[in-house]
Image (spheres, rainbow, N blue to C red):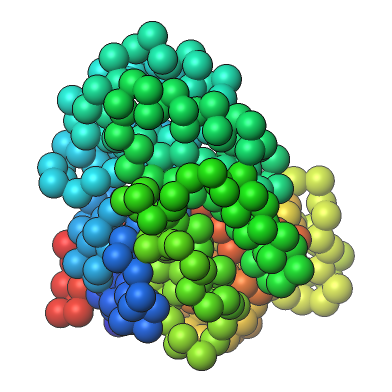
């Protein structure tokens, strides 16, 4: 649905992200239905739901079937908790011991990422705090790295009568079966002295692991990340796009052969050309490296030319383009993948770069703004 100008006048520039809440919910529903041998579905909503923002997105994820949330920081957890009181929230990042009382009060589950961290929180009152142990199976970021460390933590938990709710690891190269197999073997080795059947939640599979491999033994949880927003290497899932970025043409310029465009004169007209100026720039997350890639106007691709400015960019167009036409900066998931390739990065970074300055407009199945 093409949004009318009056619907986005409140942001004045006509620059906005459109978020399809219905597609988010339906993507989650499809995943939960297809991979139905799990008990816990963690909706990973860190980084403001991968730049989708707003509690409406979180609620759509829950409506789709996620019964646990995962965030990266206590700040993110508390923002959600203000609105949603009854769903468990796991913080995947490290929470300083000074703030564990907040976790108890607000029912935020903490991650224990190492023996060293565990020892620093032992003087704290840990009663009533839900904990998950993270195992480092090769990513070398966070996690308990050896069986000896694991056994020491496990023994301390038993001696103190503390309840361990969960244990997990993170697959860092799901596309490589050999590497993934090695990670799973490492997980088994590090936890071999623990009866995993007595741990309430064991979660290993994340988005791509979930779709590439059979159900991992001893696990009853999985984590859904960017896949909820329609991104997966497995096209058979037919997931829907949820995120698109749009702006408006605010000026049209006629260039003569030899004239240049923008800072540093990096683009020179080879003939008489028509240039459109668009009200979006690197301050909105369209970084300068986007120069040369395509945007869309009325379904037709046009290239970004010249250096991208803080608040504006320029595209080479034709006579079909009119003042105030909508420009699809990020049209859909397929386009976002193309942009990621141009930028030599991944779709995560493309959408997470689009900052809070750009308003989000939320669309539900009745096609009305929320």
Measured as percent of width and height from the top left, residue 319 is found at 59, 84
Quadrant of the rendered image containing residue 135: top right
Measured as percent of width and height from the top left, residue 212 is found at 58, 77
Asked whether residue 349 appears in the rendered view, the answer is no
Measured as percent of width and height from the top left, residue 101 is found at 26, 18
User: Position of 113 compared to 89: left or right?
Assistant: right
User: In front here: 74 or 22?
Assistant: 74
- For the point 38% across and 9% down, the residue is 123
User: In front here: 113 or 197?
Assistant: 197
Quadrant of the rendered image containing residue 171: bottom right
The correct choice, above or below, for 167 with respect to 255 in the image is above
Q: Residue furthest top?
A: 123
User: In front here: 290 or 104?
Assistant: 104
- Quarter of the image where the C terminus is located: bottom left
Q: How many marks?
A: 0
Asked whether residue 134 appears in the rendered view, the answer is yes
- For the point 81% across and 46% down, the residue is 264
- Quarter of the image where the N terminus is located: bottom left
- For the point 16% across and 72% down, the residue is 368
User: In front here: 257 or 90?
Assistant: 90
The correct choice, above or below, for 83 with respect to 327 in the image is above
The correct choice, above or below, for 155 with respect to 26 in the image is above
């Amino acid at each position: 649905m093409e949004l009318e100008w009056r619907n986005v006048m409140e942001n004045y520039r006509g620059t906005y992200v459109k978020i399809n809440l219905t597609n988010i919910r339906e993507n989650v529903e499809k995943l939960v239905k297809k991979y139905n041998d799990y008990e816990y579905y963690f909706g990973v909503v860190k980084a403001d739901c991968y730049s989708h923002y707003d509690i409406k997105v979180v609620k759509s994820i829950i409506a789709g079937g996620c019964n646990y949330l995962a965030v990266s920081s206590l700040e993110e957890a508390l923002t959600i908790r203000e609105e949603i009181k009854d769903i468990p929230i796991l913080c995947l990042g490290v929470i300083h011991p000074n703030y564990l009382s907040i976790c108890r009060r607000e029912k935020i589950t903490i991650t224990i990422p190492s023996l060293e961290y565990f020892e620093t929180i032992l003087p704290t009152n840990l009663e009533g705090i839900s904990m998950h142990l993270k195992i480092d199976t090769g990513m070398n970021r966070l996690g308990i790295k050896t069986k000896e460390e694991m056994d020491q933590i496990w023994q301390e938990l038993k001696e103190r009568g503390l309840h361990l709710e969960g244990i997990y690891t993170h697959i860092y190269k799901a596309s490589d079966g050999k590497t993934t197999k090695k990670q799973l073997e490492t997980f088994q080795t590090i936890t071999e002295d623990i009866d995993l059947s007595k741990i309430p939640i064991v979660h290993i599979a994340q988005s791509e692991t979930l779709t590439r491999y059979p159900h991992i033994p001893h696990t009853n949880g999985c984590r859904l990340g960017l896949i909820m927003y329609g991104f997966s290497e497995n096209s058979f899932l037919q997931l829907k796009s949820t995120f698109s970025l749009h702006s408006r043409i605010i000026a049209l310029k006629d260039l003569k052969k030899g004239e240049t465009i923008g800072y540093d004169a990096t683009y020179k007209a080879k003939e008489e050309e028509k240039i459109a100026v668009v009200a979006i720039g690197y301050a909105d997350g369209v970084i300068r490296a986007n120069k040369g890639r395509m945007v869309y106007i009325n379904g037709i691709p046009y290239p970004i030319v010249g250096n991208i400015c803080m608040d504006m960019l320029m595209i080479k167009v034709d006579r079909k383009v009119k003042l105030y036409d909508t420009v699809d900066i990020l049209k859909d998931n397929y386009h976002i993948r193309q942009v990621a390739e141009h930028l030599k990065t991944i779709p995560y970074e493309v959408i997470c770069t689009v900052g809070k300055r750009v308003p989000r407009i939320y669309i539900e199945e009745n096609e009305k703004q929320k």
